[in-house]
Image (tube, rainbow, N blue to C red):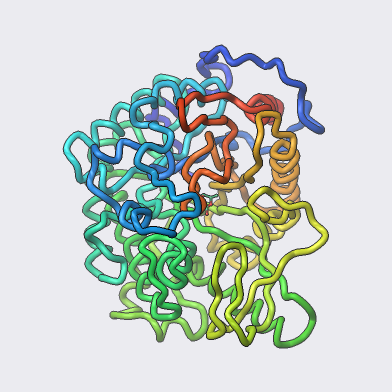
């Protein structure tokens, strides 16, 4: 991974770290198995993540995104809410940066809203946020697209990829003197599958396999963005892709074949082109345009590769009728079906807690791509639970950090870990019902209250630094 000697934020090691504590105290009891443990390489990056649409609010100060259009349609968001105010972060970012400083993390992953950048004064907000982070000794790690596409654009249009590269140049020119670590896209797999194939997310299309051009154009946008960032002098560029093991529901060959196909869609459709410059078998033919030429762009070398991990998938043969799974309506035309993972605790979202699948994910990527794979960073990992004394979240995070360490011991090159999320926020089609934060947000008063997990994570990070 590139180093960033010139980045003021990256110079703050434990010794120079701001000791600014927003007065939150450490009075809570330590979580399970906390205490001094190391086993993490020097320079390992500890951080937390958020995204623009989920926290910023101030919707009237920017152009609309596809998510504003989607949430305005009745029945699309479970609790009928919108992200118009969300955590009001645009107006409260100083308080939120103080929370980050108090947490003692090295880095903060946030996203830059393309519709805000297109609006008067929009870039000024990110300027101030980045200044505040640098002053607090927290390294800014912006994601340049986290699903909130300007409402007048469409990933089915090839032009959107070029427009994205222009957006990236504008952002890099403005912030590149202080930001050195960049993420192009967040989870193009989910944005394609949920937003364009199944219609559960914005822009709400149900195109099934006709959604594949949206995947190709996001990948092209990624490659063009890497080129734009390099042209602006960036040396530390990654992508954040979601990955999960896809376990067959049984040893039946039909279940095994379905799980292999789902693996291809979820895990390989985006990583094979980025890492190897090829589409997995059979998928390249379904993509539009001059695919071979585009793959040259898509596979521009990266400095690191981000992995978002939450839970594994259990996959079975297709079913004859439409099925419901985890809030998704899956039509019988799909060549797979999704099944519950039994015998595991589940989060409030119903997602199974399977830490060893994170080890499998990280070692699996290393095994599949070998020397072609850049160093890994876990760019998202977390869980939804209610309550301030969130011992379940502590147990989840502790077990997953151990699972990451097991991957390191098995030889995977992992350079960082980011918790999703700093604070409770607008969880897409679930609205405000799912709370992923280390910090509780009262959405009526906007009061922030650190949870037990916030205090625990601070200690865990300090202990890991040794
Ligand atoms: C990921 C998204 C992130 C958040 C978490 C819970 O898929 O990238 O924005 O919603 O899930």
Which residue is outermost to the left? 120
Name above or below for residue 83 compared with residue 317: above
Residue sitting at x 69%, y 31%: 464
Measured as percent of width and height from the top left, residue 276 is found at: 48, 70
Measured as percent of width and height from the top left, residue 172 is found at: 27, 42
Residue sitting at x 30%, y 26%: 128
Left or right: where 345 falls relative to 386: right
Image quadrant holding the C terminus, namely top right
Of the pair 400 and 281, the residue shown nearer to us: 400
Measured as percent of width and height from the top left, residue 197 is found at: 44, 73
Measured as percent of width and height from the top left, residue 395 is found at: 75, 39
Name above or below for residue 314 compared with residue 447: below
Residue sitting at x 54%, y 80%: 331
**Residue 461: quarter of image:** top right
- Asked if one can make out residue 126 in the rendered structure from this viewpoint, the answer is yes
Name above or below for residue 151 compared with residue 417: below
Left or right: where 399 falls relative to 450: right
- Asked if one can make out residue 11 in the rendered structure from this viewpoint, the answer is no
Residue sitting at x 79%, y 81%: 251
Left or right: where 247 falls relative to 284: right
Count of numbered badges drawn on the protein: 0
């Amino acid at each position: 991974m590139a180093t960033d000697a010139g980045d003021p934020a990256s110079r703050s090691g434990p010794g120079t770290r701001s000791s600014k504590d927003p007065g939150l105290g450490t009075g809570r009891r330590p979580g399970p198995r906390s205490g001094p443990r190391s086993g993490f390489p020097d320079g390992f990056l500890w951080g937390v993540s958020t995204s623009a649409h989920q926290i910023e609010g101030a919707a009237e100060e920017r152009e609309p995104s596809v998510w504003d259009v989607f949430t305005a349609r009745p029945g699309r968001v479970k609790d009928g809410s919108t992200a118009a105010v969300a955590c009001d972060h645009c107006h409260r970012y100083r308080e939120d940066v103080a929370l980050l400083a108090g947490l003692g993390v090295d880095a903060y992953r946030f996203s830059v809203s393309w519709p805000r950048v297109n609006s008067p004064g929009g870039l000024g907000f990110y300027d101030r946020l980045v200044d505040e982070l640098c002053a607090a000794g927290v390294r800014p790690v912006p994601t340049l697209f986290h699903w909130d596409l300007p409402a007048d654009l469409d990933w089915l249009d090839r032009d959107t990829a070029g427009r994205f590269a222009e957006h990236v140049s504008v952002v890099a020119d403005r912030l590149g003197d202080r930001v050195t670590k960049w993420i192009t896209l967040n989870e193009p797999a989910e944005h394609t599958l949920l937003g364009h194939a199944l219609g559960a997310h914005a822009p709400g299309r149900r195109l099934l396999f006709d959604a594949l051009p949206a995947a190709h154009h996001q990948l092209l946008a990624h490659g063009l963005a890497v080129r734009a960032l390099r042209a602006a002098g960036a040396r530390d560029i990654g992508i954040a892709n979601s990955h999960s093991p896809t376990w067959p529901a049984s040893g039946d060959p039909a279940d095994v074949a379905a799980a292999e196909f789902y693996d291809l869609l979820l895990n390989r459709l985006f990583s094979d082109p980025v890492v190897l410059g090829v589409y997995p078998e059979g998928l390249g033919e379904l993509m539009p345009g001059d695919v071979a030429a585009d793959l040259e762009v898509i596979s521009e070398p990266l400095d690191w590769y981000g992995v978002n991990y939450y839970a594994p998938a259990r996959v079975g043969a297709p079913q004859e009728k439409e099925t419901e799974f985890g809030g998704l309506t899956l039509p019988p035309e799909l060549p797979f079906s999704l099944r519950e993972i039994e015998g595991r605790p589940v989060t409030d979202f119903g997602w199974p807690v399977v830490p060893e699948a994170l080890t499998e994910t990280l070692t699996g990527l290393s095994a599949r791509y070998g020397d072609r794979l850049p160093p890994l960073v876990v760019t998202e990992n977390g869980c939804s639970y209610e309550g301030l004394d969130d011992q379940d979240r502590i147990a989840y995070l502790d077990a997953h950090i151990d699972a990451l360490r097991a991957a390191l011991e098995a030889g995977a090159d992992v350079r960082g870990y980011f918790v999703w999320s700093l604070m409770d926020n607008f969880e897409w089609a679930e609205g405000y019902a799912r709370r992923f934060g280390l910090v509780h947000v009262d959405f009526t008063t906007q009061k922030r209250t650190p949870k037990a997990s916030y205090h625990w994570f601070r200690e865990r990070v300090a202990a890991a630094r040794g």
